[in-house]
Image (tube, rainbow, N blue to C red):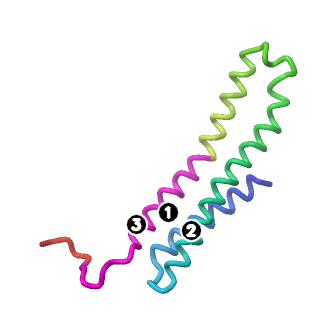
Amino acid sequence: MTAIAFASLLLVALVLCGAVAFSNQRLRPRLKWLLLGSLLLVWLSLGFAIAQIVARTSSTMVTPGGARQPHLMESAAGEGLTLLASLGGPAVLATILAALALKISRRRPPGASSDRTP
């Protein structure tokens, strides 16, 4: 269930990235806070999803005497890192896109022009 929540929150964060980048000035502050909140929820749900999946699969990968069998512990650690990379990659991408959307949507002073040529 938490993996589904993670995927849904990730989609919401990506939609909000686009909304922040292309919204008008009046609506943008609310969307920025929604985007930051959804990113926080994405990272929290990522942690819960990984903890739930690892807890569910650790009983099958590591026997009760698993501490004495290092090859089983290494296998479980490798599976956990693979899971972190496969779920963490999209979360990092959404965070980078959100940072870029927030950067380009900053309010400019009234006299400043968007043209950077002298």
* Residue ID at (66%, 62%): 9
Residue that sits furthest to the top in the current view: 68
Pick whichever of labels 1 and 3 is earlier in the sequence: 1
Crowd class of label 3 (few under 14; some 14 to 19; many from 20; radius 10 Å): few
Position of residue 6 relative to residue 22, above or below, is above
Where are the magenta residues, as a range?
A: 88-113
* Residue ID at (56%, 68%): 35
Residue that sits furthest to the left in the current view: 118
Crowd class of label 1 (few under 14; some 14 to 19; many from 20; radius 10 Å): many
Q: Do the residues labelled 2 and 3 touch (CB within 8 Å)?
A: no
Circle number at residue 15: none
Say if the magenta span includes residue 101: yes
Res 116 → quadrant: bottom left
- Horizontal side of 16 relative to 117 (left or right) equals right
Which residue carries the number 2 mark? 35
Circle number at residue 103: 3
Position of residue 81 relative to residue 38, above or below, is above
Could you say where residue 38 lies in the image, as x and y percent from the top left?
A: 62, 65
For marks 1 and 3, give the CA distance.
Answer: 8 Å
Which residue carries the number 1 mark? 98
Type of the residue with mark 3 = Lys
Q: Are marks 2 and 1 in contact (CB under 8 Å)?
A: yes
Type of the residue with mark 2 = Leu
Crowd class of label 2 (few under 14; some 14 to 19; many from 20; radius 10 Å): many
* Residue ID at (73%, 52%): 3
Q: Are marks 1 and 3 in contact (CB under 8 Å)?
A: no
Type of the residue with mark 1 = Ala
Position of residue 14 relative to residue 75, above or below, is below
For marks 2 and 3, give the CA distance.
Answer: 13 Å
